[in-house]
Image (cartoon, helix red, strand yellow):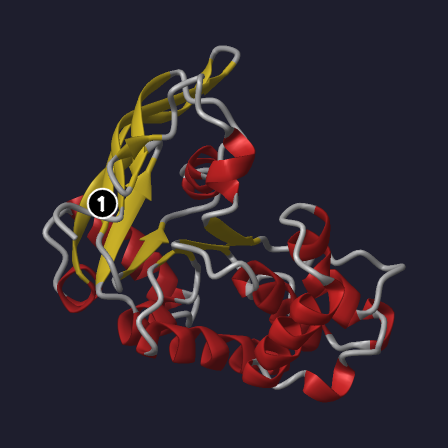
Amino acid sequence: MSGPALSCTGVVKRFGALEVLRGIDVDVHEHEVVALIGASGSGKSTLLRCINLLEVVDDGVIRLDGEDITDPRVDADRVRGRIGVVFQAYNLFPHLSVLDNVTLAPRVVHGVARREAQASAMALLARVGLADKAGAYPDRLSGGQQQRAAIARALVNAPRLLLLDEVTSALDPELVGEVLTLVRELAGQGMTILMATHEMGFARQVADRVCFLDDGVVREQGPAAQVLGDPVEARTRQFLARIIEAGRL
């Protein structure tokens, strides 16, 4: 490909008088992992919701493989079919088994035959270590298992881009590792990922680049080792110093 898989240029998002995103410029290239870091309220989750067209931007352009997906004439459902999203909360349907959760979109939205959808879903569940839980309901799974099921559901349509929004924040500390291991494996397999995370050590290990968001703008971005180990901006250094004090880096 020429050009990035995802390009955000001058993205602005307001909620009433509150300007949450104030001109965001972020690119993600094919097979690249980019981590968004920053304090709560810095705009990370809002940016991901804008990329998945769950929020309408007030200014700027978001392009996926060169296509302006912020054009109001764009079919949002078609775009979302190319983007996998995993949120902080698992958002699994409690009345459906793990297998049915994963096969729902292929069958209902994309018209895939049940047998074909189930075969693809079982391959994915094996990939995330949940093949033996295919018939279980979400309330019978641990938090880490539920989040891995949510990741399988996000991958079932072979998305062009995977968005991860603080996927470990709702987990007990002992369950964080199993989800991070899965994300690390996906990154190693060449998945294109944009993730918001508070796990700085994980970002250092997995991300190719890190973008530090502060008050709705990108204060600093660059290779993970540079931004997290030797940041240029004073505001980045201040943020990371607080993270170190909290024992999260």
Residue 226 lies in quadrant: bottom left
Q: Secondary structure at mark 1?
A: strand
Q: Mark yes or no: residue 91 visible.
A: no
Q: Residues within 10 Å of mark 1 (few under 14, many from 20)?
A: some
Please name the residue shown 76% across and 79% down the image.
134
Across the whole image, how many numbered discs are drawn on residues? 1
Q: Is the residue 244 above or below the residue 60 in the image?
A: below
Looking at the image, is 224 positioned above or below residue 186? above
Q: Is residue 75 left or right of residue 138?
A: left
- For image coordinates 48% across by 44% down, the residue present is 40
Q: In the depicted view, which residue is nearer to us: 119 or 226? A: 119
Residue 10 image position (x, y, % from top left): 24, 25
Residue behind mark 1 = 27
Vertical position of residue 164 compared to residue 59: above or below = below
Q: Is residue 138 left or right of residue 173?
A: right
Q: Specify whether residue 127 is in view.
A: yes
Q: Quadrant of residue 156?
A: bottom right
In percent of width and height, residue 157 lies at 53, 58
Pick whichever, 249 or 32, lies toward us: 32
Please state which amino acid type lies under the numbered disc 1. Answer: Asp
* Residue depicted at x 25% and y 62%: 32
Image location of residue 120, percent across then percent down? 61, 73
Q: Residue furthest right?
A: 95
Q: Name the residue at 85% across, 62% down.
A: 96
Quarter of the image holding residue 12? top left
Residue 235 placement (x, y as % from top left):
22, 44
